[in-house]
Image: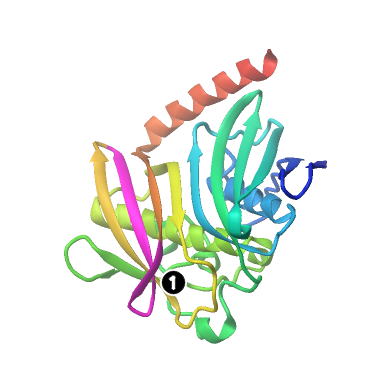
Amino acid sequence: MTTYAHTGADAGATVDSELVVDEENRFFFDHPLDHVPAMLLLDAALHAAGRLPGASASVTALHMRFDRFCEKDLPSRLRVSTTPRPGGARLLDARVVQAGAEVARAALRVEPAPSGPLFPAHVTGPRTEPADPRLVHKRSAARVLVGRLDHGGGRTLTTPVLAPVEPGAADVHPLTLLVEAARQASTMVNHSVWDTPPDWQFIVSTLELSLPVRTPWPHRPVLRCHPRRLHHSDDSVMCELLLGDAPQGRISFTGRTVPPAAYRRLRESARRSRRTEAAR
């Protein structure tokens, strides 16, 4: 159920809705997961933002943090509110709350812009060979949104962004597709640069994005990735978005990379904590 609160164009508006978790959606659940993936939380926030007044807009900045695992078996609420800014821009605040606790929060800036596809057919052309699905934590190559890494020297790596061929991607927000491509690139870079075993988990803690107002893209997007080890298992990967040779924004992830046994301990601790909170 979705509710809307409109208090006038100058005072902003709010969308409050239940978070829908559809495990039959193979774009987000390419393989069984024990929690709601970060990309689904992002996509839900972007779609909710699109239901606010002035939906024909372009996201130019986003900061999203993931404070807790979002459990699949507990109800969650998504609340997105907007504050108008001079010149037609808007600042949006999105929160996902579960069992009375905030699990994710995002701040977005949107600018007036005409709507349009992020991957126009004349730009994408024939699909190049996708990356190894195992290196981006996917089972199906149809859900891989990046090509193979080009080691251009040092620890700077590039990979093309691929248009989706998975039928379920048709309903995914275009910006989610771009961010998911960067997530896949970051995961692949993590395995390639740090020699991380494929079964280790990358737990996203923050996502940052900066983009110009959307215009028709004249070239196939390419991600130029800059990995950095922050502390022990804490990693950061900043992906510049290139159109031709010109940088047109960036997408950055930070998070922890943990082995399977450590991940299981983290998940069991998180589930116990959520069950306790939900029972209160």
**Mark 1, secondary structure of its residue:** loop
Colouring mode (rainbow / by chain / secondary structure / one colour): rainbow
**Residue at image location 67% in from the left, 42% down from the top:** 81
Which corner quadrant of the image does residue 7 belong to? Answer: top right
106 or 18: which is nearer to us?
106
Looking at numbered disc 1 in the image, what kind of residue is underneath it? Answer: Pro
Q: Give the answer, above or below, for where 75 lies relative to 56.
A: above
82 or 36: which is nearer to us?
82
Q: Give the answer, above or below, for where 32 lies relative to 113.
A: above
User: Residue 47 appears at what percent x and percent y?
Assistant: 68, 54
**Residue at image location 33% in from the left, 78% down from the top:** 245
The answer to if 93 sits in the magenta stretch is no
Q: Can residue 79 be seen in this snapshot?
A: yes
**Please, which residue is most extreme toward the left here?**
154
User: Residue 247 appears at what percent x and percent y?
Assistant: 36, 70
Placement of the N terminus among the 4 image quadrants: top right
Q: Can residue 28 be seen in this snapshot?
A: no
230 or 142: which is nearer to us?
230
Left or right for 211, reference 121: left
**Label 1 crowd bin: few (<14), some (14–19), many (20+), radius 10 Å:** some
User: Residue 197 appears at what percent x and percent y?
Assistant: 31, 48
Magenta extent: 233-249
The answer to if 244 sits in the magenta stretch is yes
Placement of the C terminus among the 4 image quadrants: top right
> Can you identify the residue that label 1 sits on?
130
**Prevailing secondary structure class for the magenta stretch in the rendered image:** strand
